Amino acid sequence: MAAYLIEHWNYILDGAIFLVCVAILGGYQARLVRRTRLSPTRTVHGMNALARSAWVEQAMSKGWDVVSVQTLRNATMAATLMASTAIILILGIMSMLANADKIGPTLHILNLTGSHASSLWIFKLMLILVDFFVAFFAFSLAVRGYNHVGFLVNVPVDKEGKSHGVTPPKVALHLNRAAAYYTIGMRTYYFCVPLLMWLFGAILMVVSTFGVLAVLKHLDHLPQQD
């Protein structure tokens, strides 16, 4: 057993650090979701969800047709840009996979503790590839949601007993769902940083994980006010 651990120590170290970093980021995300659900005004995501619901209410009741379309177009363009960027990055990673035997040794110069095996390096690239595929589909679903809301938000509020079923709470639900997909896409961009640093070594992955954690904590939480 001891001989096996010594022989595969680099693999074990890489895998353990990866699992620890995933647990740290996953625990932070779970805590953020719970806090947003219980105290929405204490997080940026909760406040934005409330603001979007209020905006839909005002837009549908006051007939903000042009403002609504312009606002949703801006959101759609942002999501489209991020989805296109994800596709470009996917192609770049696939190119790296095709040349893994040439690029790997160069990146291992900074990897002083982890494994230099080509199979593990390819596994790391595959994780990054999956990460950006998730980003692409998340942003694509966000574009789809914003396009649907563009039609729904311009439906007049039912004031004459016409049961078309399009109400501000339902439209706000669609809008917040699209925004949630956009947030997932952005999260995958943030989480790709530790994965990219893992290519250079497990130590850099740990450092970048805590760096991303500090950035997310600053972005996700509102400053406390008296």
Image (spheres, rainbow, N blue to C red):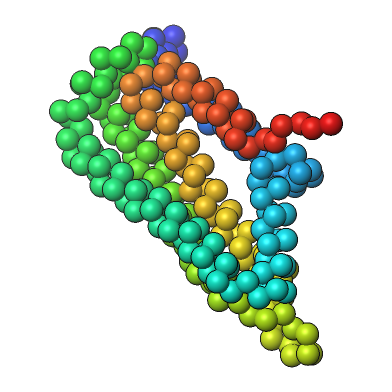
Residue 74 vs residue 128: left or right? right
Identity of the residue drawn at 63% across and 59% down: 176
Residue 191 vs residue 164: left or right? left
- Nearer to us in this view, 26 or 69: 69
Residue located farthest toward the right when viewing the structure as drawn: 226
Residue 120 vertical placement versus 176 (above, below): above
Q: Is there any visible trace of residue 81 in the rendered image?
A: yes
| Residue 200 horizontal/vertical position (percent) | 33, 21
- Nearer to us in this view, 22 or 186: 186
- Quarter-wise, where is residue 97 in the image? top left
Identity of the residue drawn at 15% across and 28% down: 102
- Nearer to us in this view, 116 or 185: 185
Identity of the residue drawn at 57% across and 55% down: 179
Residue 132 vertical placement versus 6 (above, below): below
- Quarter-wise, where is residue 33 in the image? top right
Residue 34 vertical placement versus 225 (above, below): below
- Number of marks in picture: 0
- Nearer to us in this view, 144 or 117: 144
| Residue 36 horizontal/vertical position (percent) | 72, 44
Q: Quadrant of the C terminus?
A: top right
Q: Quadrant of the N terminus?
A: top left
Residue 112 vertical placement versus 39 (above, below): above
Q: Is there any visible trace of residue 133 in the rendered image?
A: no
Residue 48 vs residue 188: left or right? right
| Residue 192 horizontal/vertical position (percent) | 42, 36
| Residue 221 horizontal/vertical position (percent) | 67, 35
Residue 226 vs residue 48: left or right? right
